Amino acid sequence: MSLFYEDFTVGQSFSGGRRTIPEAEIIQFAQIYDPQNMHLDRLYADEGPFHGLIASGFHTLCLAWWLFLQLGLVQESMWVGIGIDALRWQRPVRPGDTVSLKVEIVDKSPTSAPDRGRIVFSHTLTNQHGETVMTYQSINLISCKVDHPS
């Protein structure tokens, strides 16, 4: 069930969802969207700076966004995402890693439109060892239950 603008409060957090990333998915994503050897070629990757195949950072971002949507918080209430800030890839995601997501509301403000508000979600993606692999903030327009005063 989706939450609406009025349902969110700054400081509120949500966790959930896990996803294990198979090697074939890492390679397939890289072949289509980020064809660099560290994502495609096991032998090259083994000798490279990461000592093994790693997922594209953009693949990792897509995984985090998918996990966010799976929480069901905004499936029916989100108008649109309007930006991403402070994106940081902190650790590589490797084949077989299981990632999970924590989201916190860090800002909330009305807009000039009476039927939606602006919410900033802080996303933290961690691996199975509890290590942070990526952080970012998404800025989204979220529907109001009722029109807020302009």
Image: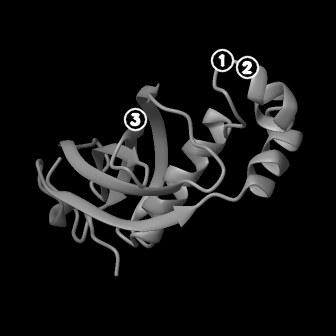
Q: Which mark is residue 48?
A: 2
State the separation of the CA atoms marked 3 and 1: 24 Å
Disc 2 on helix, strand or loop?
loop
Within 10 Å of the Cα at label 1, are there few (<14), some (14-19), or many (20+) other Cα atoms?
A: few
Q: Is residue 147 above or below residue 118?
A: below
For the question of whether residue 36 can be seen, the reply is: no
Q: Could you tell me the amino acid type at mark 2?
A: Gly
* Residue wearing tag 1: 49
Disc 1 on helix, strand or loop?
loop
Q: Could you tell me the amino acid type at mark 1?
A: Pro
Within 10 Å of the Cα at label 2, are there few (<14), some (14-19), or many (20+) other Cα atoms?
A: few
Residue 15 position within the rendered picture, expressed as x and y whole percent measured from the top left: 29, 63
Residue at figure coordinates x 23%, y 49% from the top left: 104
Residue at figure coordinates x 67%, y 40% from the top left: 55
Within 10 Å of the Cα at label 3, are there few (<14), some (14-19), or many (20+) other Cα atoms?
A: some
Residue 58 position within the rendered picture, expressed as x and y whole percent measured from the top left: 64, 37
Q: Are marks 2 and 3 in contact (CB under 8 Å)?
A: no
Of the pair 143 and 1, the residue shown nearer to us = 1
* Residue wearing tag 3: 136
Q: Is residue 24 above or below residue 88?
A: below
> Relative to 107, is 82 on the left or the right?
right
For the question of whether residue 139 can be seen, the reply is: yes
State the separation of the CA atoms marked 1 and 2: 4 Å
State the separation of the CA atoms marked 2 and 3: 26 Å
Q: Are marks 3 and 1 in contact (CB under 8 Å)?
A: no
